[in-house]
Image (tube, grey):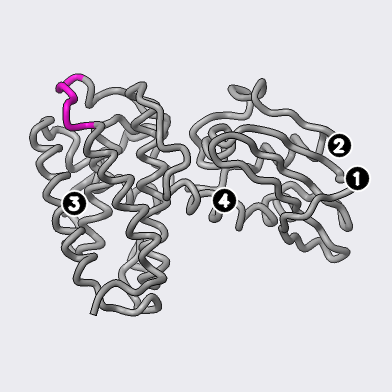
Amino acid sequence: MSLHPSLQTYADAWTHSVEAISELVQPLVEGEWNRRTPCPGWSVRDVVSHVIGMDCEMLGDPRPIHTLPRDLYHVSNEHQRYMEMQVDVRRHHTAPEMTSELEYTIIRRNRQLRNESREPHAKVRGPLGSEITLEQSMRYRAFDVWVHEQDLRTALGRPGNLDSPGAYIVRDDLLAVLPKVVAKEAGAPANSAVVFDVHGPVDFLRTVRVDAEGHGTIDGAVSLGPAATLTLDWETYFRLACGRVTVDSVADRIKTEGDPELAAAILRHFVVTQ
């Protein structure tokens, strides 16, 4: 048997992004590994450590036994502590150690994917000891690795791949939570609509509609007379949603029309990743 067809999209996206990451970091000299990335609290080395660590967990490797320092300002909850463990344990690794472990992990994961015969609904280990499906796990890895590829590109001044396979997985996952952001978090009024007009390498027009009970849904139809319209580029959209930039720092890249208080409330609650 081989990889289930419904998992192939995630495998392809992961492969594309992780190979791009490998290519980006292979020529780096020691000092460049310490550059800050847009991911809060993490350097280039930290981002690559996270990618390695999470894929080692996909391989079933045991988690490191390691005590985190108490002064990590960007670690404030259990989920962040869980993610930080694989990062902090590699903080003193050299550039050759990092690139060789990354390459070895990619080889092992590619072998695992070639031999993967489990069904998409098979249960696997998730963060914090949770159980999730194999499909959820692979989708999460595709999302995560693409966003971190972009973190590295920003830190290293090497833009690109804004419309690669992982970008569309990220787009769909971010759009899936948009109704909650608009209807619940931002408190859009009942029987209203909010339009998101996103342009750039990945472009889309979506309308979030809030019904009489305050529940939100999303579709691609144009809304006449929306309560608010937000127009922005794809890079700003995902960086904002993933907590890589603040609203104030990209205010000149966002155009809003309609109810200014509703638009501001939506942008205040736009971050949806932990």
Which residue is disc 2 drawn over? Answer: 259
Label 1: state its secondary structure.
loop
Rendered location of residue 268, percent (x, y): 67, 37
Query: Quadrant of residue 87 in the image?
Result: top left
Q: Earlier in the sequence, mark 3 or mark 2?
A: 3
- Give the crowd class for mark 4: few <14, some 14-19, many >=20 residues within 10 Å: many
Q: In percent of the image, x 17 and y 32: which residue is there? A: 26
Q: CA distance from mark 4 to mark 1?
A: 24 Å
Q: Earlier in the sequence, mark 4 or mark 1?
A: 4
Rendered location of residue 265, percent (x, y): 74, 39
Between label 1 and label 2, give the one nearer the viewer. Answer: 1
**Which segment did they paint magenta?**
25-31
The three-letter amino acid code for the residue at tag 3 is Ile
Which residue is disc 4 drawn over? Answer: 174
Position of 146 relative to 134 (above/below): above
The three-letter amino acid code for the residue at tag 1 is Gly
- Give the crowd class for mark 2: few <14, some 14-19, many >=20 residues within 10 Å: few
Q: CA distance from mark 1 to mark 2?
A: 11 Å
In this rendering, would 74 be left or right of 262?
Answer: left
Q: Earlier in the sequence, mark 1 or mark 3?
A: 3
Q: In percent of the image, x 32 and y 47: which residue is there? A: 16
What label does residue 225 carry, if any? 1
The answer to whether the residue labelled 4 contacts the one labelled 2, judged by CB atoms less than 8 Å apart, is no
Which residue is disc 3 drawn over? Answer: 106
Position of 206 relative to 69 (above/below): below
